[in-house]
Image: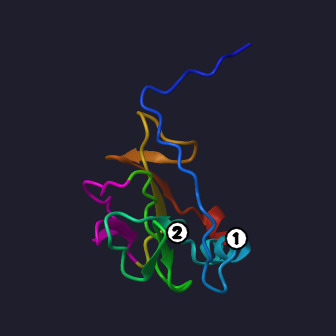
């Protein structure tokens, strides 16, 4: 029987509060929009860093919520610290890394030394490029 190995520096556990999303946002819309336009960087609420959200988001109870469904997504933040830099295809927006329109990839902050299946390492991020398969979904 295999045992799970503990992480040296596990990410903090965050307890999400219920947040009212703007009208028109739901998981099926986000999935279909992401697949159709191949924006693998999903448009989701992110943690508020300091007192400013990225442009196109509004602050609500410790989160930054997208104003509309047309706002480019940002790389999720799992701590209340600003990332040191943004990977290619993303630009800094009030301390967050927001996807540049037309970029066909998504990014996650890297935990430890390895990336999830389907992602590759680029600096402090795990990157997943848009493929012809994801463009067809």
Q: Quadrant of residue 92?
A: bottom left
Q: How is the image coloured?
A: rainbow
Q: Secondary structure at mark 2?
A: loop
Q: State the CA–CA distance, disc 1 to disc 2.
A: 12 Å
**Whole-percent x, y for residue 77 in the image:** 42, 57
Q: Quadrant of the C terminus?
A: bottom right
Tell me which segment is drawn in magenta: 80-100
**Whole-percent x, y for residue 67 in the image:** 50, 85
Specify the label residue 108 is tagged with: none
Q: At 53% from the left edge and 63% from the top edge, which residue is drawn?
A: 130
**Whole-percent x, y for residue 4 in the image:** 62, 22
Q: Quadrant of residue 83?
A: bottom left
Q: At 31% from the left edge and 47% from the top edge, which residue is drawn?
A: 123
The residue that label 1 is drawn on is 27
Foreground residue, 89 or 58?
A: 58
Q: Quadrant of the N terminus?
A: top right
Q: At 67% from the left edge and 70% from the top edge, which residue is drawn?
A: 31
Indicate left or right for 72 with 87 as reference: right
Q: Mark 1 and 2 residues: CB-CB less than 8 Å, in contact? A: no
Q: Main secondary structure of the magenta part?
A: loop
What is the tally of numbered marks visible in this picture? 2
Indicate left or right for 32 with 45 as reference: right
The residue that label 2 is drawn on is 45
Whether the magenta-drawn stretch holds residue 89 is answered as: yes
Foreground mark, 1 or 2?
A: 2
Q: Considering only order in the chain, which callout, 2 or 1, is on the residue closer to the N terminus?
A: 1
Dot 1 alpha-carbon crowd within 10 angstroms: few under 14, some 14 to 19, many 20 or more: few
**Whole-percent x, y for residue 35 in the image:** 64, 71
As displayed, is residue 43 above or below residue 58? above
């Amino acid at each position: 029987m295999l045992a799970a190995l503990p992480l040296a520096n596990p990410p903090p556990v965050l307890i999400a509060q219920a947040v009212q999303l703007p009208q028109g946002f739901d998981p099926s819309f986000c999935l279909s929009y992401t697949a159709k336009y191949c924006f693998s960087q999903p448009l989701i609420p992110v943690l508020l860093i300091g007192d400013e959200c990225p442009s196109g988001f509004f602050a609500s109870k410790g989160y930054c919520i997208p104003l509309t469904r047309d706002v480019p997504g940002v790389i999720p933040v799992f701590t209340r610290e600003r990332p040191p830099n943004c990977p290619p295809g993303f630009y800094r927006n009030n301390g967050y890394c927001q996807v540049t329109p037309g970029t066909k990839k998504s990014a996650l902050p890297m935990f430890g030394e390895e990336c999830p299946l389907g992602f590759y390492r680029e600096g402090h991020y795990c990157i997943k490029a848009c493929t012809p398969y994801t463009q067809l979904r």
